[in-house]
């Protein structure tokens, strides 16, 4: 997804363009070995831009560019979600919106119940997608897509994850993402896949 000659990241500080505590924890764990100082968009008081894109890549770019231009510091954003082919790709880019409750708060237990109810007896195949976008204040950006395949399971199992983790079993495992120790998930998740590509392309000193 990225250009043939990606821009190298040489700055000491990076904005994590997210207000989601679960994502922030994963990013911090992934970035920890590289000695990069991170600050979240929430800590800087940056608003969350409206996600008007129709793909994961478009929404990731919107968020990264908003934080980079708003802070004057390079920013890393992701857009990710669960794709269920039997539901015509839903919830997909609307994964977070599926969890929006009447009070405006996100209720992923409700979203998981809705997903399983709508899926019924159809094919349980599913995959998580993550697109990472690294953007600079001058508007330049690099994007990378990761994916992990698996299946939907019910009932919910595990309390270590977030989002739809408790109903997703990655291929080759008999446990959900929410049952995995964080370091195990971080090593093989869709976010880890995209992050590995990012590091290889933009952080060559760390390869």
Image: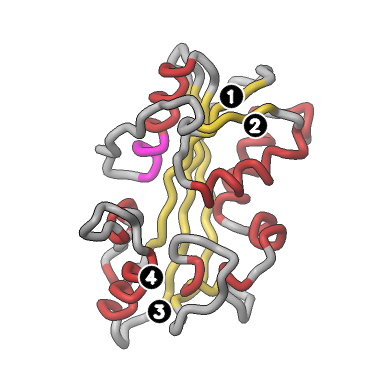
Magenta span covers which residues? Answer: 56-60
Residue visible at 68% across and 27% down in the picture: 37
Q: In this orientation, which residue lies closer to the viewer: 103 or 109?
A: 103
User: Residue at label 2?
Assistant: 201
User: Residue at label 1?
Assistant: 6
Q: Which mark is residue 109?
A: 4
Residue 59 rendering spot, x and y as whole percentages: 35, 38
- How busy is the neighbourhood of tag 4: few (under 14 within 10 Å), some, or many (20 plus)? some
Residue 206 rendering spot, x and y as whole percentages: 78, 32
Q: Nearer the viewer, mark 2 or mark 4?
A: 4
Asked if the magenta segment contains residue 118, the reply would be no
Contact flag, marks 1 and 2 (Cβ < 8 Å): yes
* Lower sequence index among marks 3 and 2: 3
Is residue 74 at least partly visible in the picture? yes
Q: Secondary structure at mark 2?
A: helix
User: Residue at label 3?
Assistant: 124
Q: Secondary structure at mark 3?
A: loop
> How many marks are shown on the rendered structure?
4
């Amino acid at each position: 997804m990225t250009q043939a000659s990606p821009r190298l990241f040489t700055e000491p500080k990076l904005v994590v363009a997210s207000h989601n505590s679960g994502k922030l924890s994963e990013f911090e764990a992934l970035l920890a070995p590289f000695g990069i100082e991170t600050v979240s968009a929430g800590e800087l008081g940056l608003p969350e831009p409206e996600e008007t894109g129709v793909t994961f890549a478009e929404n990731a770019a919107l968020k990264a560019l908003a934080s980079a231009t708003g802070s004057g510091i390079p920013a890393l954003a992701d857009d990710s979600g669960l794709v269920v082919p039997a539901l015509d790709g839903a919830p997909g880019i609307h994964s977070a919106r599926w969890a929006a409750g009447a009070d405006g708060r996100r209720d992923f237990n409700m979203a998981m119940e809705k997903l399983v109810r709508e899926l019924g007896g159809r094919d349980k195949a599913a995959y998580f997608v993550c697109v990472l976008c690294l953007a600079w204040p001058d508007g330049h950006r690099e994007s990378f897509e990761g994916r992990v395949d698996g299946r939907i399971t019910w009932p919910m199992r595990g309390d270590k994850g977030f989002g739809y983790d408790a109903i997703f079993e990655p291929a080759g495992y008999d446990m959900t993402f929410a049952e995995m120790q964080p370091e195990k998930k971080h090593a093989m998740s869709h976010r880890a896949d995209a992050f590995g590509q990012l590091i290889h392309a933009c952080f060559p000193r760390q390869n």
